[in-house]
Image: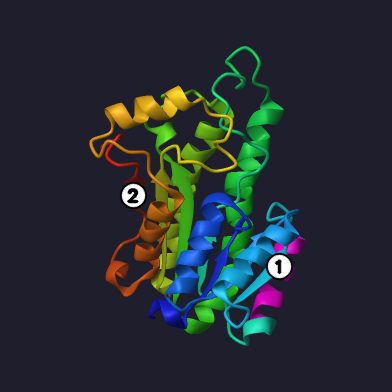
Amino acid sequence: MNIDEQVVLVTGSSRGLGAAIAKAFGKVGADVVVNYVKNEDMANQVVESIGNDHAIAIQADVRDEYQVDKLFEKAREHFQKPVTTIVNNALIQFSFDAVNRKTADTATWEDYNAQFEGSVKAALYTVQAGKKQMTESNFGRIINIGTNLFQNPVVPYHEYNTSKAALVGFTRNMAKELGADNITVNMVSSGLLEKTDASAATPDDVFDVIRENTPLKKVVTPEEVADSVLFFAAPWSRAVTGQNLVVDGGLVMD
């Protein structure tokens, strides 16, 4: 299925990387569901940038199974066709603040659990709700957003990095089971992005270190990561599943 035939849900897409991904899909003609929790005005701005004929903003906390089910129902009702593509991007209550991060001494299980719920629990609910619609079309694309930090924790954001490591396992197990229904499940893992709300607390010298140590001598932008997400939704990747693509300018080479 070509991208311009797909209905794409991007969770947490009112700002930052999620907004860039939603806009990227909109540019190539997909119908886009812009999911948000609180930032209704920003979500509507993303919809306007795509065009009201091809996008809708829908509020839902993707950690809540009932709200996720309703999200998919509203999307199908609006576009009059099933959701084919899910991008699990939502970031729950986390800031990339290397100075004030939780350390090995101060991190609590509640901190870990909050990130597990935002990464794995939310992805579980969207996959379960989406599978029902994808099997009807015998087509589905699921792209989970990870991080290069679980492979190379330059900054040990303990709870966040660990939750994304768990998301790799989730990705590969779902890829194994859902492949028979022509549903692929992959992950795109970026590094620190320049500059989003989530990375606003990151000191400039951290970005300088990334530029110095990255082969491309640059900090990757949200738009560049979004292009790689499109690859996993496009026909070119139809034989690829269970993979984690690191998009960080070559900083981490897996």
Of residues 76 and 25, the one nearer the viewer is 25
Find the residue positioned furthest to the top. Answer: 105
Q: Is residue 59 left or right of residue 132?
A: right
Using the image, determine if residue 26 lies above or below residue 219: below
Of residues 217 and 161, the one nearer the viewer is 217
Find the residue positioned furthest to the bottom. Answer: 80
Magenta segment's dominant SS is: helix
Give the numbered dot on residue 98: none
Residue type at tag 2: Leu
The C terminus lies in quadrant: top left
SS of the residue under disc 1: strand
Number of marks present in the image shown: 2
Residue 78: x, y in percent? 67, 82
Res. 12 image quadrant: bottom right
CB contact under 8 Å: marks 1 and 2 = no
Residue 227 seen from this side: yes
- At 50% from the left and 33% from the top, the residue drawn is 161
Q: CA distance from mark 1 to mark 2?
A: 28 Å
Q: Is residue 71 magenta?
A: yes
Residue 60 seen from this side: no
Using the image, determine if residue 96 lies above or below residue 87: above
Q: Which residue is mark 1?
A: 58
Number of residues whose C-alpha sits closer than 10 Å to that of mark 2, classed few (under 14), some (14–19) or many (20 or more): some
Q: Which residue is mark 2?
A: 245
Residue 36: x, y in percent? 69, 58
- At 57% from the left and 79% from the top, the residue drawn is 54
Res. 118 image quadrant: top right
Q: Which residues are magenta?
A: 66-76
